[in-house]
Amino acid sequence: MIPRYSRPEMVAIWEPQTRFRIWFEIEAHATDKLAELGVVPKEAAATIWAKARDAVFDVARIDEIERVTKHDVIAFLTHLAEIVGPEARFVHQGMTSSDILDTTLSVQLARATDILIADVDALLAAIKRRAFEHKFTPTIGRSHGIHAEPVTFGLKLAQAYAEFSRCRERLVAARSEIATCAISGAVGTFANIDPQVEAHVAEKMGLAVEPVSTQVIPRDRHAMYFATLGVVASCVERLATEIRHLQRTEVYEAEEFFSPGQKGSSAMPHKRNPVLTENLTGLSRLVRGMVTPALENVALWHERDISHSSVERMIGPDATVTLDFALARLTGVVDKLLVYPQNMRKNLDRLGGLHNSQRVLLALTQAGASREESYSLVQRNAMRTWEHGEDFLTNLKADKDVTAKLSAAELAAMFDEGYHFKHVDTIFARVFGEA
């Protein structure tokens, strides 16, 4: 997590002061319930809130204590006692460190996901606007990187919209799964703390109760969470890669916005490079790289170990901060994307109408030729067009075997571009709704 690829709102979730504030709230809410149950004095619970509710925790002091204790939660509790006074002895009654650490991580990941969902919403809005702008802008579709049949640029963006709509649904599901609270004490048996405390803390922190924790919240939840972030990152890369290909000089159908004063190369002043989408490709790799460690965290020893801890201290902030930045950057790319319909038209016409080959093939089968014969007739004219730069329709009209089945007028009708776009409205209705 470095400033270059970070945004303040997401970074703030992972700052030490935020973490210690969440720790305090969990401890204070737990003490409230313990007071209600008669385990600790009500006056003590009130004092804890009164003295520390608005406190700014001394991060340097906590670090100083931890250098001696070698234990972060004990260091925090020691510092809290310095703020609260004698009543601090009633904090952390019957609780274990994982109750604080795991519940806090749940809060942080839930808050981070709220930002990511908002990021996706902004991206969806940008994609939708550009999709309708180019709903019927014709361009060539490609398979294996080779010209196939016509599509519209709007359809390309509609596909991205549908993909990120699924990403949003996955993030909502991931948030629900990760947002659980465990206040169950050592090895998760509630031996020294009432389950009502857990339920109270969960309600106050906006979490669900973890049905059974083995001192830690089960890490399959976290594995699924980070896997979801990896899928979203892959979708970011897919759209970024499409834009990178479209910006290649030989294609040049779309291009990242190139701002006044921007420089593309230190050596070649003419360069306008797809640096933002290349950057997004790299960031996506980083986020995906954090999925495997999360998967490996699922298998802990017995009721707990801390082999997962070092991993999560890094991938929690790094994955969410990086993906937040990537989604925001991609939104900006889409919003300002330069689209060149004239180049799309030039590329569409580049192969002399070969993109209509399937329609001719089908027409020949409808006219009585076998599929094998039809394919052979179309392919031999297509290869001649491909190899000699000729016009496909002209070649077909000159082929007596073809014209024996289809008249010149019937062949010409096979080259109506609108044929390929007759269901664009249907697809858009499926993706964006009937309205």
Image (spheres, rainbow, N blue to C red):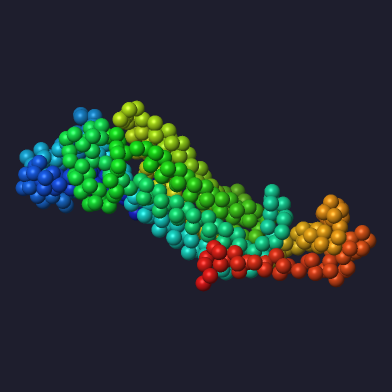
In the image, is 96 to the left or to the right of 270?
left
x, y (%) of residue 417? 73, 67
Residue sitting farthest toward the front = 368
Indicate whether 357 appears above or below 423: above
Tell me which corner region of the image, top left, top right, bottom left or bottom right, holds residue 69.
Answer: top left
Q: Nearer the viewer, residue 434 or 143?
A: 434
* Horizontal relation, residue 229 to residue 213: left or right: right
Q: Nearer the viewer, residue 421 or 157?
A: 421
Q: Quadrant of the N terminus?
A: top left
Q: Position of residue 378 (x, y in %)?
A: 84, 56
Q: Position of residue 425 (x, y in %)?
A: 61, 69
Is 3 placed left or right of 406 in the picture? left
Q: Residue at x 30, y 43 (%)?
A: 210
Measuring 67% from the left and 62% from the top, which residue is drawn there? 151
Q: Residue furthest right?
A: 400
Asked whether 180 or 267 is in front, the reply is 180
Residue 287 in view: no
Q: Is residue 39 above or below residue 408?
A: above
Residue 252 spot, x, y in % from top left:
66, 58
Q: Between residue 435 and residue 335, name the one nearer to us.
A: 435
Eyeballing the image, is 243 above or below 284?
below
How many numbered circles does the render carry?
0
Q: Examine the rendering and report whether any part of residue 128 can be seen.
A: yes
Residue at image point 92% right, 63% down: 404
